Amino acid sequence: MDKDAVLDEFRAAGALLEGHFVLSSGRHSPAYMQCARVLMDASRAGRLCAALADKIRARIDEPFDLVVSPAMGGVVVGYEMGRQLGVPAIFMERVDGNFTLRRGFDIVPGARCLMVEDVVTTGLSSRECIAAITAVGGNCVAAACLADRSNGTADVGVPLVALVALDVPSYADGDVPQALLDIPVSKPGSRFLKS
């Protein structure tokens, strides 16, 4: 599946949004990829994740024992990647701001894990999830995402495989262009940010 086909799937789902958004990373952007909308259609999610699984198999030689995702955005894509790769899928949740395993989930020490996100912008959530996997004894072999908004510049500490890499601008609080500041802001991400 090439870049245009992936973006067509997002457009068809009404998941490519334009405006003024504060991302989960806290950065501002004129564009937002609402993966929850693109993943709400199981057939579409299957197509996208099958294409991502093919890219992962082509790049990562090592097999995986487990898919681990950060909640909220990674839950659906992580489940579908587990199905595509034929391994169990679990997710981490934030407790007091830190990722942790709950709901009876565990990671066997030494388990080869694939960390799966929906979207990567700065890689912060990915790095935090990978650190949590390592802290409980897992071996995070690689990471994957549907969309890499950093166009390959985000460093998550392990190889990152993205279904599509995009160069979408994002700005720190003090660097937001006036044209973007003139648009009402929306905070569609899953991480709570102070106003």
Image (tube, grey):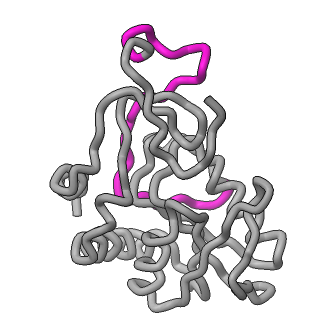
The quarter of the displayed image where residue 141 is located: bottom right
* Image coords of residue 183 (percent x, y): 37, 18
Q: State left or right for residue 91 relative to residue 176.
A: right
The vertical placement of 97 against 91, above or below, is above
The vertical placement of 178 against 33, above or below, is above
* Image coords of residue 66 (percent x, y): 60, 84
* Image coords of residue 97 (percent x, y): 76, 53
The quarter of the displayed image where residue 48 is located: bottom left
What residue lies at 43% left-to-right and 8% top-to-bottom?
Answer: 178
Is residue 177 in the magenta section?
yes
The residue closer to the viewer here, 14 or 9, is 14
What range of the chain is rendered magenta? Answer: 157-180
Count of numbered tags: 0
What residue lies at 52% left-to-right and 24% top-to-bottom?
Answer: 171
Question: For the N terminus, which image quadrant?
Answer: bottom left
Q: State left or right for residue 118 relative to residue 163.
A: right
Q: State left or right for residue 107 relative to residue 114.
A: right
What residue lies at 61% left-to-right and 29% top-to-bottom?
Answer: 195
What residue lies at 60% left-to-right and 64% top-to-bottom?
Answer: 70
